[in-house]
Image (spheres, rainbow, N blue to C red):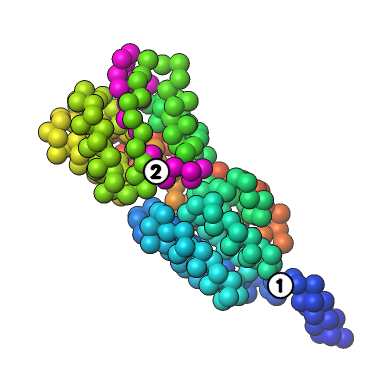
């Protein structure tokens, strides 16, 4: 009789279009990151560690080819829906992937965003991320302490239009407010790549020979900027370079004196909490809509703590 009631209940859920979690050890989820850099590899490794310590949580992994690989990420979302996942944890490459995610939600799949938000999309279960605006303020407040009136600042944006990356710039400008009078002499996009970071920084340095500081909203462009500065024969102490992510060689650049500071996110915590939030939501537990994974400033004084 008990078995008959269980089967009947499962059938009722199926007819209602709901995919029940049969047991706590039978969860299948997808984990999608943007593109192959250290930051997202760290997130994926944290997800793998979570799966190892939570037997029965089966994770399918996918990753885009670049920071602008919208079609690739949509294809990954659709593939995971086809493979029967109950949830997807994803770092959305762009807000335009929202319709594909909504199709997943309409199919009964829960979605937790990581790292980047899609502000106008209401289908997400939760967002596990750094508060990028406040993290950007950390960078601005640091710059405020090392610059003086009349200094010039060039900005290397990530991917304009991506809310998390835009917040890193607007937050930085807020952190600068109330300090010395700084002139912003240029904002160049980089798609968060090292190669574009080199060329964008070169353009800033060519147009502004007396440039005093560069702020990069992603780790790879910060490293690219350090290369451009070295190629131009500019001494480390002649220009202030501040990055964001503490990844992709930035810590080595801080140790060598080529980069002054960076804002560290905690990608391992982001990956772990993103997966844990998704698993608990699938099991019917109440979860917070915003999971703040923190940020901190890295300089020569504390870089060893992050290595």
Pinpoint residue 163: horizontal percent, then vertical percent. Answer: 51, 43
Q: How many marks?
A: 2
Query: The N terminus lies in which quarter of the figure?
Result: bottom right
Q: Could you say which disc has been placed on residue 115 in the image?
A: none
Q: Which residue is mark 2?
A: 158
Query: Which one is nearer the viewer's eye here, 206 or 267?
Result: 206
Res 298 visible: no
**What residue is drawn where x is 50% and y is 33%?**
134
Residue range in magenta is 143-163
* Residue farthest to the right, as pictured: 1
Mark 1 neighbour density, 10 Å: few (under 14) some (14–19) many (20 or more): some
Q: Secondary structure at mark 2?
A: loop
Res 86 visible: yes
Pinpoint residue 52: horizontal percent, then vertical percent. Answer: 49, 68
Q: Which residue is mark 1?
A: 19
Pinpoint residue 161: horizontal percent, then vertical percent. Answer: 48, 43
**What residue is drawn where x is 15% and y is 30%?**
235
How far, Cα to Cα, is label 2 from label 1?
38 Å
Query: Which one is nearer the viewer's eye here, 181 or 126?
Result: 181
Which one is earlier in the sequence, the residue at label 2 or at label 1? 1
């Amino acid at each position: 009789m008990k078995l008959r009631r269980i089967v009947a209940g499962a059938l009722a859920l199926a007819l209602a279009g709901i995919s029940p979690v049969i047991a706590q050890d039978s969860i299948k989820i997808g984990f999608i990151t943007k593109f192959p850099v250290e930051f997202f590899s760290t997130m994926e490794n944290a997800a793998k560690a979570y799966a190892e310590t939570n037997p029965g949580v089966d994770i399918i992994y996918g990753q885009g080819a670049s920071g602008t690989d919208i079609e690739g990420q949509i294809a990954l979302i659709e593939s995971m829906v086809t493979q029967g996942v109950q949830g997807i944890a994803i770092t959305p490459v762009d807000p335009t992937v929202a319709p594909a995610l909504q199709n997943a939600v309409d199919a009964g799949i829960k979605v937790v965003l990581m790292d980047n938000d899609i502000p106008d999309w209401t289908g997400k279960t939760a967002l596990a991320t750094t508060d990028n605006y406040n993290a950007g303020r950390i960078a601005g407040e640091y710059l405020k302490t090392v610059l003086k009136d009349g200094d010039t600042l060039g900005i290397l944006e990530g991917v304009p239009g991506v809310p998390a990356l835009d917040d890193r710039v607007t937050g930085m400008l807020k952190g600068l407010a109330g300090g010395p009078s700084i002139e912003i002499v240029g904002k160049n996009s980089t798609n968060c790549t090292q190669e574009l970071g080199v060329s964008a920084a070169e353009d800033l340095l060519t147009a502004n020979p007396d440039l005093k500081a560069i702020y990069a909203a992603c780790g790879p462009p910060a490293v690219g900027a350090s290369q451009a500065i070295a190629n131009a024969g500019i001494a480390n102490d002649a220009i202030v370079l501040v990055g964001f992510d503490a990844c992709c060689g930035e810590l080595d650049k801080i140790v060598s004196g080529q980069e002054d500071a960076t804002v560290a996110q905690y990608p391992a915590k982001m990956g772990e909490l993103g997966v844990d939030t998704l698993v608990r939501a699938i099991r019917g537990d109440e979860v917070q809509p915003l999971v703040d994974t923190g940020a901190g400033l890295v300089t020569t004084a504390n870089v060893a703590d992050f290595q």
